[in-house]
Image: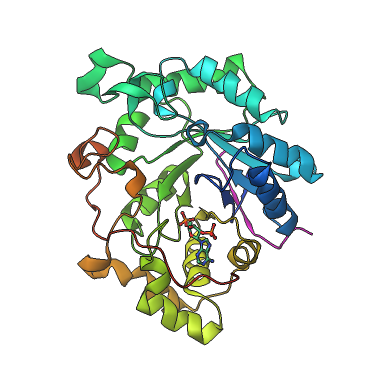
Amino acid sequence: MAADIPSFTLNTGAKIPSVGMGCWQGQPGAGKDNELVDALVKAINVGYRHLDTATGYANEREVGEAIRKSGVPRSDIFLTTKLRPGGVNDPVKEFEESFNKLDVEYIDLWLLHWPQGFTSSEGNFGGGDVCGLEHQKHLGPTFNETWAKMEDIFLNSHKGKVKAIGVSNFSIKNLEILLQTAKVVPAVNQIEQSPLLPEHKLNEYCKQKGIHITAYSPLGQMSSAVHDDETLNEIAKKHDVTAATVALSWAVQKGTSVAPKSTNEKRMKQNITLIKLSDEEMKQVDHISDDPKKHTRLNYLVFDKDTHKILGWTMEEMGWDVGFLQEPGKSTKKVGE
Ligand code: A2P
C-alpha cells in the first residue's frame, strides 16, 4: 500500500513525491546477494514512490531491478539519476549507459550531479584534473556546455526517454552562471539541506526561478547532529515522534522534497510518516542554524580535509558560504534495531 505522501509539481508539470529513498550510500552487500535490490523492493512496498540514484553510486542496475521486481506500475514511480562529474565529456554515452542499466522504459529526472567535471572518466566520480568553471575551460567542458548537451538529449536526441532535467549541488552563484546560457530552466536543484543547513536564500532564489529543491542527506548523513539536536528533540517529544521525523516534516512543509536514506524497514516507515508542525515550531526549526556552531555542511564524503576543497573546487568556486564544522559521528538515537 502506498503511504499518503504529498507531491510537488515541477516546472514540467510532472509530480515528484515529497519523500523519496536516497540510494547514495553503499548499502550492505550492494550488488551482492541481491541485498540492495531487496532493501529497495522493501522501500517500495512500504510506500516509497521516488528512488533517487546516480551513476556515481554504482547501483543503477539494482535500482532498476528493484523497480521491475516490486510489481508497482512504472508510471507510479518517480526515478532520479545523475550524470557524474567524470561523465561530462560524453553525456550521450553516459545517458545511454544509465538508461540501459536502469532498464525501466524512461528516467523521470536526470540531474547534473555536480557543477564540477573531471577530465578523465575513470572511477565512479571520474578522475584526472577537475574542470568546469569558466577559467578552467581549457581542461574540459564548463557546466554551461554540459547542460547544453543535456538539453539536447532531453529535447531532441533522446526525447521521451528522460522526462525532466535538473542540477545538483548548485549554489545561487553557479545557477546565475548556468541561467545565462540555459534554454531549459532546471526542474530541480538537489542540494544538501537539513535543519543545520536550511539554505533559506537558495530556497527563495529557486522558488523565484521555478526550480524545485530536493534535499539530500536531510538527516545529516553520518553525523548525529540532527538526531541529537535539542530543539528538534523538544518538538519531537511534544508530538511523540523522533527528531528525524521533525526534520523531514519541516522540510516538506517548507515545500522541498526529501530523499533520506535508510535500509532499515522501521526507519523507512518512520521517514515517510510526516507530522504537521505549528507555525511556531516551523520558526523554531528555521532558526536552529542561527547559532553559528549549528550551521554546517555534513556531507563529508566530498570534502578533502587537507586542501579544504570540494571535489577539487574551493568554497568560493562552489559559491558556498557555509563550511564543514561538525565531525561525523554515528547517531545513537536510531529506532527499530
Ligand atoms: P540506516 O540506513 O541504518 O537507517 P541521510 O539520509 O541524511 O543521508 O542519513 C542517512 C543515515 O541516517 C543513514 O546512516 C541511516 O541509517 C540513518 N537514518 C535514516 N533514517 C533514520 C531515522 N529515522 N532515525 C535515525 N537514523 C536514520
Q: Is residue 10 magenta?
A: yes
Image spot of residue 324 (x, y percent)? 25, 53
37 vs 122, left or right, is right
Q: Nearer the viewer, residue 8 or 298?
A: 298
Residue at 78 percent across and 41 percent down: it is: 69
Q: Is residue 256 visible?
A: yes
Q: Residue furthest bottom?
A: 238
Figure quadrant of residue 7: bottom right
268 vs 174, left or right, is right
Image spot of residue 319 (x, y percent)? 25, 41
Q: Is residue 50 above or below residue 93?
A: below
Q: Is residue 297 above or below residue 162?
A: below
Q: Is residue 13 visible?
A: no
Q: Is residue 48 above or below residue 182?
A: below
Image spot of residue 138 (x, y percent)? 24, 13
Residue at 33 percent across and 29 percent down: it is: 116
Quadrant of the image containing the C terminus: bottom right
Q: Which residues are magenta?
A: 1-12
Image spot of residue 117 (x, y percent)? 34, 25
Q: Is residue 212 above or below residue 103?
A: below
Tell me which secondary structure the magenta stretch mostly adopts: loop
Q: Is residue 57 magenta?
A: no
Tell me, what colour scheme is on the image?
A: rainbow
Figure quadrant of residue 159: top right
